[in-house]
Amino acid sequence: MTNEPRPIDLSPLSDIPATNPWDEHNQRWVDFVHPLDWKNPEPSGRYNLLVIGAGPAGLVTAIGAAGLGAKVALVEKHLMGGDCLNVGCVPSKALIAAGKAVAAVRDAHHFGVRVPEGTSIDFAAVMLRLRRIRADISHHDSAARFSELGIDVFIGDGEFMGRNTFAIDDKTIRFAKACIATGARAAAPPIDGLESVPYLTNETIFSLTELPRRIGFIGAGPIGCELSQAFRRFGSEVVLVESEHGILPREDREAADIVLQSLLRDGVDLQCCARNLRIRQEADGIHMAADSEHGKQHYDLAVDQLMVAVGRAPNVENLGLEAAGVEYHKKGIKVNDRLQTTNANIYAAGDVASKYQFTHSADFLARIVIGNALFFGRGRASALTIPWCTYTEPELAHVGKTVAELEADGIDFQTFTVQMSEIDRAILDGESDGFVRAHADRKGRLLGATVVAAHAGDMIGELSLAMTHGIPLGQIASAIHPYPTQAEAIRKLGDAFNRTRLTPTIKGLMNTVLKWRR
């Protein structure tokens, strides 16, 4: 392969800016997820299940149903793999990994390692690696693979023609059950002047090949925090604008503040409590002007690139949902707890129908659809225990209820915290910022947990398992963890709970026994 564009009709990709630049890696990626020479099959009779959308929810639904013997049709308008593979989890984590490598070199002197001055960052090579890895991974979600598994894969625009029919091109697909898994897309909030300037979203930022000298991010949620830290480490001047106080507003405040301090140490310029944000284009760049919360301060900052990292809209347009009898609203498709839409034979899963817009939640919602739609299952979305993680450095992960939610619900709980500075492995690794915190009932059953640590995303799984299966903190304490590991902090949570059970009465009895046995 060469870096030269192939002589092929690229018009089907004209509304997918993520495919730029059209180099060998993006060509290989597109060959998997939107092959330009794909021939849609002829529909063959009535399908047990029609799946619309080939993101995580749609792919899991299709492959799981087909593996159980169902006759499945899968429709995708844009790119197989959805946001996660193409413009979300995969490219962003490749970028973040490169940023961590920069920080490791920068901070190597703390470990007695001397790195020559003048070490340079080749941003074009960083992005080339991103595109190469995305292409390497994308075969898992390819149209050819799903076709080989016995699924009829249709690529192109389509819409419902009735309550049990769907049309794509000149073909009509009849189905017994259907699942809408069309996901969501970046949608800019109503900001004065934003429409008058070019701006990036998660759907375009990974197409950059040159490092912006100055870049601004609107929104200090997970995407804004992750990417602002990465670009600052690459050498961009970074401004992060947030309307709330601080960052990551739905997280534990103490945990979010630890991430905030890390961003500030990296050199991110955080402008929070922004009011009346205005955007305009000037000769020296794109200007972001705003007032402070109480109007006592004003700033006007210029950047070369601007990314909107807040706002999502469900993909519900042009699907013929009215013809199918499927109701929807501005937040997505209306579903009940069993993921049925207002057409009992049509289900919805993933970002188009869930407040939890994560790949892993889409995966497990899809499993509910398979059981409920095809096998008389009674699975409920509300029964899922869904963790999440923001992949800054340190990472911040959470599962279950927050303190505010527990207090609002009037739940009696106790909180246990283990600082990472008390964990030998974290100290040895130079990663002692952070803590593990759990909220539990009086029997030690977990109600919620937060981890802010270098490997929080890996550590939260043990706490999620405990919540899902009702394993109390006392039993976690009895599980032997390898030494030294950072996950030892979770065992120490169990120790902290067990100490609360050592009441004065029990201590007195134990002292009596010990005196008697002298």
Image (cartoon, rainbow, N blue to C red):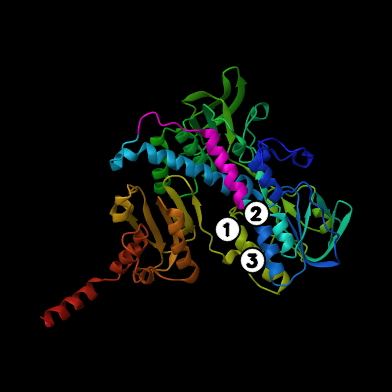
Q: Which residues are magenta?
A: 116-137
What amino acid is at disc 1? His
Q: Is 488 positioned to the left or the right of 389 in the image?
A: left
> Residue 184: horizontal and vertical position, in percent?
67, 48
Q: Residues within 10 Å of mark 2 (few under 14, many from 20)?
A: many
Check the picture and name the quadrant holding the C terminus: bottom left
Viewer-nearest of labels 2 and 3? 2
Name the residue at 55% across, 42% down.
129
**Dot 1 surroundings within 10 Å: few (below 14), some, or many (20 or more)?**
some
The residue that label 2 is drawn on is 139
Mark 2 or mark 3: whose residue is earlier in sequence: 2
x, y percent for residue 343: 78, 63
The residue closer to the viewer here, 291 or 181, is 181
Q: Which mark is residue 360?
A: 1
Question: What kind of secondary structure does the magenta stretch mostly adopt?
Answer: helix
- Amino acid bearing label 2: His
